[in-house]
Structure formats: structure tokens, C-alpha cells
Image (cartoon, grey):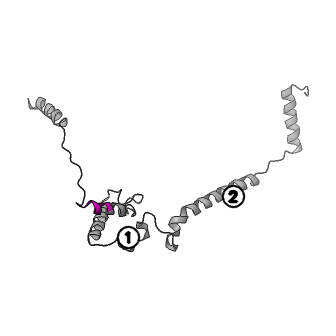
Amino acid sequence: MLRKLLPALLALFIHLPAPAAEALPASEDPVLEARVDELGHLLRCLVCQNQTIADSHAELAIDLKNEIREMMRAGQSNQEIIDFMVARYGDFVLYKPQVKSTTWLLWFGPGVLLVLGLGTLFYKLRRRVTQAPAAELTPEQKRQAYSLLEQADGGDGK
């Protein structure tokens, strides 16, 4: 009896609507949340590395957003918070780091690698063409080739 009733009960519970609620903001102050979100788009998630902390759901990103929120409640400006994050995590924490001598590799490294790769490819291809000259046939090989051609033509020389 229980074996027949259990699947029916499971099917009933699966099809019942589940109550859902909208996610509550982390703060009751929408202005503060807008500032946190704005600043979150300027900082890189150190776990994901290709996302901002505003877009990331990693635990570190959530912790950083909470820390930013607390710093804002303490009255610190956006620039003060950014300066604190850079001092703590380095220029890499900035989603778009400033161009300066310490970030040249971040900005120009991919372009330099691309140019070097294309230059190497071009050099190798040119070298391959100039290294493989066409082989000259010896007089005996030429005679054999003409002989084969005459046989293929039927020997009439046309």
C-alpha cells in the first residue's frame, strides 16, 4: 500500500507551486546600494578575474562588496575606497587599470606578443620558401623524362 502511495505523493509535491520571494537588497538604502554597484563595476573579482565584483557571485566578491558597503557607511568616498583596494590588492584589482609603468605589461603585453608571433610566422614562412630551391634535373634525368613523355604521346612527337 505504501509503495503505491509514495509515488503518488511525490508527484503531488513536485507539482505544487513553490512560494518565491524577490531577493532583498543587502541594504535598506537604495542610494548606498547604487554606489556599491557603481564601485563594484570598477573593481575586478580576484577569483573570477574576468568579471567585476558587481557581476560575480564568488564569496570573495561578496565579502568585498560588504566591505565597500561598510566603508561607505563610514563616510569614505569612492576614491578613498579604490585607493584602499589598490593598496591592499595591487593594480590588478582595478577592472581597467591606469596606464603607468607598473601596468604596461597588462596594457601592452598582449599586443607585443601578437606582433612577435606574427613576425616569427612571417620569418619562418619566408625562410622556408628561400631554403627550398627547385631541384635541377641532371641531363640523364631530362633524357628519361623526354623518353617517358614520348612513350605517353604514342611516339609521334606531337
Tell which residue pokes out farthest to the left in this image: 1
Residue 21 is left or right of residue 41, and the answer is: left
Q: Quadrant of the image for the C terminus? A: top right
Identify the disc placed on residue 67: none
Identify the disc placed on residue 82: 1
| Magenta-span inclusion, residue 28 | yes
The residue that appears at 29% across and 67% down in the rendered structure is: 67
* Figure check: 133 above or below 30: above
Q: Nearer the viewer, residue 147 or 124?
A: 124
The residue that appears at 36% across and 64% down in the rendered structure is: 39
The residue that appears at 8% across and 29% down in the rendered structure is: 1
* Figure check: 13 above or below 28: above
Picture quadrant where residue 147 is located: top right
* Figure check: 25 above or below 75: above
Residue 33 is left or right of residue 155, and the answer is: left
Identify the disc placed on residue 123: 2
User: Label 1 to label 2, Cα distance in Å?
Assistant: 45 Å
